[in-house]
Amino acid sequence: MSSVPVQHQRVLSGMRPTGLLHLGHYHGVLKNWVNLQNEYECFFFVADWHALTTHYEDPRIIAESTYDMVIDWLAAGVSPGSAKLFIQSRVPEHAELHLLLSMITPLGWLERVPTYKDQQEQLKEKDLATYGFLGYPLLQSADILVYKAGQVPVGEDQVAHVELTREVARRFNHLYGKEPGFEDKAEAAISKMGKKNAKLYQDLRKRYQQEGDQQALDVAQALLESQQNISLGDRERLFGYLEGTGKIILPEPQALLTPASKMPGLDGQKMSKSYNNTISLREDPDDVTRKLRTMPTDPARVRRTDPGDPQKCPVWQLHKIYSSEDIQAWVQQGCTTASNGCVDCKQPVIDAVIAELKPIRDRAKEYINDPGAVKAIIDEGCEAARDVARDTLDEVRKVMCLSQRQ
Ligand code: TRP
Ligand code: SF4
């Protein structure tokens, strides 16, 4: 039950600033963002408050990583012309919405989110029995709902957080979407659409409510989106009226599962900072060469003359990403007959990684040398984000009977 048609949906995602980005991020999250920015209105932000929930004892890494992270996004091809790039803590509306949502969120919902216990187990060296850490997924809900985002690109581990967001939104709409005379107001809003569209809306609504016709719902939602002369409040009423609820103030988002990165780390496990097996986006060619040269291969190839099996070699995983079919055939043949040494075999991968990083490093260098430009991009992103966030908070404060900003 989403209340915004797909093509109009806003995309929102965030990343915690806890270190330099690496090729795993590039092949997973960042390439995905670059694709999305061309199709949707995108908001991407540095989740520094989220980082603080786990790094509160030594927050310096957060400050250090924040700008670097935006530079890495830009270097990877995220474009400030297409996406808004900003920093969570610079948009205080996230915190205000988090607080307001905390009023209506049952404690059990947060205690049951799987990452809560999992992370406490995994990060035993940190004391995560804090109020802030329990609220982590609710802060994430506020991040999403403050922009009324329709789609949230996340990894598998974050899907439960988007689920929680949906439940919180539903509860919010249920509690505050009711208003005296809702039906009359909705009917009045319908007539503002003009005769033809009003009739179309009524027909589609009936088809959805009486026959469960999903397509009718989609068409009606698109119809509402395209209406120029109805107010925001009326639009929310009509979205809700369509689905037989009250006003839909905070629409429910969908998780957009990020395709898993196939990029293995230098030891064949998933590339991850905690495994110390990464190639960073800023890695210089000598370090790339050194890291890949010392990468383990099929343990059966003790001597140069021992044949090997690419299936048992992490370097083969990299050939699958970087090498043409011809080179792959050369690897298979050369490895299983011991006609190639591992050093030779690795060279095409080394060349490909260096070539892939070249434009990224060049772009990063430009931004590193021009901090003013990065600052301007972030300032602009923060302003644009705040404009949207303020509007949402105005509505939220109103329905929660709080005093209005003049
Ligand atoms: N929790 C996310 C992560 O660790 C980061 C994040 C914070 C986020 N707020 C968000 C992602 C909102 C998507 C939407 O990856
Ligand atoms: Fe791995 Fe290539 Fe060496 Fe075979 S020849 S073990 S595929 S690095």
Image (tube, rainbow, N blue to C red):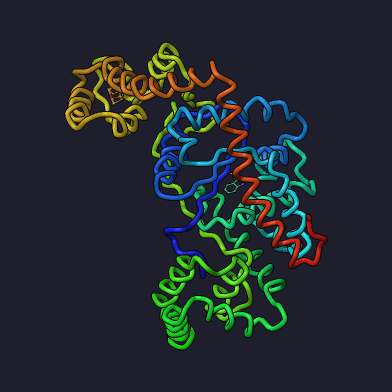
Position above or below: 146 against 53? below
Residue at 72% from the left image edge and 55% from the top image edge: 97
Residue at 69% from the left image edge and 54% from the top image edge: 138
Position above or below: 179 against 355? below
Q: Nearer the viewer, residue 75 or 294?
A: 75
Q: Is residue 163 visible?
A: yes
Q: Nearer the viewer, residue 212 or 305?
A: 212
* Coordinates of residue 123 in the picture (x, y in percent): 68, 39
Label total for image: 0
**336 horizontally vs 141: left or right:** left
- Image quarter where the C terminus lies is bottom right
Residue at 56% from the left image edge and 51% from the top image edge: 158
Image quadrant of residue 28? Answer: top left
Q: Nearer the viewer, residue 68 or 312?
A: 68
**21 horizontally vs 93: left or right:** left
* Coordinates of residue 82 in the picture (x, y in percent): 46, 41
Position above or below: 43 against 289? below
Residue at the outermost top position: 286
Q: Is residue 269 visible?
A: no
* Coordinates of residue 330 in the picture (x, y in percent): 18, 25
Residue at the outermost right position: 403
Image quadrant of residue 59? Answer: top right
* Coordinates of residue 144 in the picture (x, y in percent): 60, 53
Residue at 55% from the left image edge and 60% from the top image edge: 253
Q: Nearer the viewer, residue 186 or 59?
A: 186
